[in-house]
Image (cartoon, grey):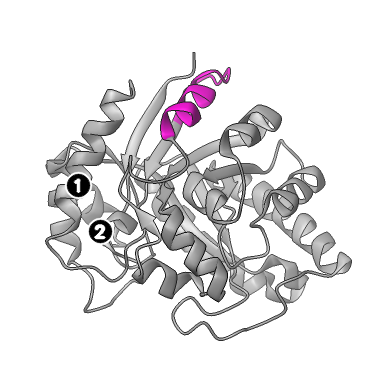
Amino acid sequence: MTRIRIGSAPDSWGVWFPEDPAQVPWPRFLDEVADAGYEWIELGPYGYLPTDPARLAGELAARGLRVSAGTVFTGLHHGPAVWDATWKHVADVAALARATGAGHLVVIPSFWRDDKTGKVIEDRTLTPAQWRQLATQTARLGREVQDRFGLRIAVHPHADTHIDTEANVSRFLDATDPDLVSLCLDTGHYAYCGGDSVQLIKTYGERIGYLHLKQVDPAVLAQVRAHETPFGPAVAQGVMCEPPNGIPALEPVLAAARALDREGGLFAVVEQDMYPCPPDRPLPIARRTRAFLRSCGV
């Protein structure tokens, strides 16, 4: 059975941006994530944690922490016109991820509406030409990241992006090369968009390269859907909730993931979106979530 490596991320401490007075300072995040019992973390938004590799390595080592992945945001459906700007951002994050020993780069598609204001930025539906560009440029990104940094990209379906629903995730996977592009299955975002994580793992198991463990509050989600609330305000309303109080149930997801024949194991990183949040809120939740996951056998 596949070994599951549990981690956490700045997101679970209400961190969405490199700098924001509503967020906890990075030393506090590192102290508390270690205190909560996690060994693995993600880098979070580039610039939140120190970007000097030697300094960051020292801070991590002092707390017994290791890095599983970096995260980048891309708008690759716009085609070659955005490649240079995209690559500059990706290369910075990938270099830091590699320097800290990570093996993955989580790739989040750009939002079609602003996650803070809810302003519509572009059409929520891609044209066939944009789908082709998305597939082509993502494969290019996967190849470049692999060749230059030795990392594997894992594309993250996300609310308010063009890779969100079961149909769009399937379309994206069917159009991309498994050798270059894997999927970061975020159980909360996939449920938010109506998907079934267990079924996705069973159908596209060979494409699952990384997991984000998250749950949604079904009552809040019903209101979000009824009012077409943008993702940022939905998070502020508590749509993402503490396990095991929401959906999907994580035990079947973890069981399906363990059943994959995955040499080297699979990372499952806890992410409970809660920007903004009081600074004293994340640590107790992180401790309880880690205890719950131990009860699930991971």
Look at 68% across and 64% down and name the residue there. 162
Figure label count: 2
Residue 198, how many percent across, how many down?
58, 32
Q: Is residue 236 left or right of residue 263?
A: left
State yes or no: discs 2 and 1 in contact (Cβ < 8 Å).
Answer: yes
The residue tagged 1 is: 33
Residue 255 forms part of the magenta stretch: yes
Q: Give the residue type at disc 2.
A: Trp
Residue under the point 33% across and 71% down: 18
Instruction: Choose top left, top right, bottom left or bottom right for residue 19.
Output: bottom left
**Mark pair 2, 1: CA separation:** 9 Å
Residue at (45, 53) in percent of width and height: 218
Residues rendered magenta in the picture: 250-266
Q: Nearer the viewer, residue 224 or 291?
A: 224
Which residue lies under the disc numbered 2? 13
Along the line of sight, the residue nearer the viewer: 237 or 51: 237
Q: Position of residue 124 (x, y in %)?
A: 70, 73
Q: Where is residue 140 in the image (x, y as percent from the top left)?
A: 72, 54
